[in-house]
Amino acid sequence: MTLQALRGADLLHVHGLIDVQGCRGPVRCSYLQHLAHQPVELQAWPDGDRTGRLTFITRNIEEKAVPACSMPCAS
């Protein structure tokens, strides 16, 4: 199960950029609780660094619990 399915009410906002094979630029993902917005492929990385980065704004979720769960982007 994913963090979104298990703790969606406490997952206030997640946003960031991920590197997707076959995409020229990063894919921007955004979640608000149980709602996943359509991913958007951007033209280029903002700084050339292709490292994925996600920001989690949560309530009552310990930081160590976040990496243990996966959050796939909506398709």
Image (cartoon, rainbow, N blue to C red):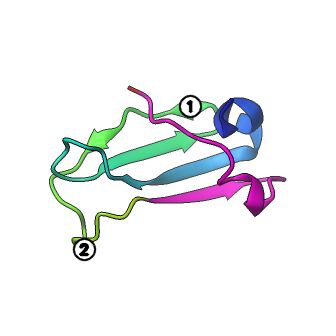
Residue sitting at 25 percent across and 43 percent down?
Answer: 21
Instruction: Determine the residue located farthest toward the top in the rendered image.
Output: 75
Q: In this rendering, would 33 be left or right of 39?
A: right
Q: Which mark is residue 9?
A: none
Instruction: Indicate the position of residue 24 as horizontal and vertical percent values.
Output: 15, 50
Q: Residue at x 81, y 58 (%)?
A: 62
User: Is 45 situated above or below 65?
Assistant: below
Magenta region, residue range: 53-74
Q: Residues within 10 Å of mark 2 (few under 14, many from 20)?
A: few
Quarter occupied by the N terminus: top right
Q: Position of residue 60 (x, y in %)?
A: 84, 53
Classify residue 17 by image quadrant: bottom left
Instruction: Determine which residue is flagged by label 1.
Output: 35
Give the residue at mark 2: 47
**Nearer to me, 24 or 9:** 24
Magenta span has 58? yes
Q: Horizontal placement of 40 versus 44: left or right?
A: right
Closer-to-camera residue (67/30): 67
Q: Position of residue 23 (x, y in %)?
A: 20, 44
- Point out the residue furthest to the bottom here: 47
Query: Which SS class for mark 1?
Result: strand
Q: Say which amino acid is labelled 2.
A: Asp
Which circle, 1 or 2, is nearer the viewer?
A: 2
| Precedes in sequence: disc 1 or disc 2 | 1
Q: Looking at the image, which is closer to me, 32 or 46?
A: 46
Is 61 magenta? The answer is yes
Instruction: Kindly identify the amino acid type of the residue bearing the numbered disc 1.
Output: Leu
Residue at the location (69% across, 49% down)? 68
Occupied quadrant, residue 33: top right
- Distance between the alpha carbons at the discs numbered 1 and 2: 28 Å
Mark 2: secondary structure: loop
Depicted 52 relative to depicted 38: above or below: below
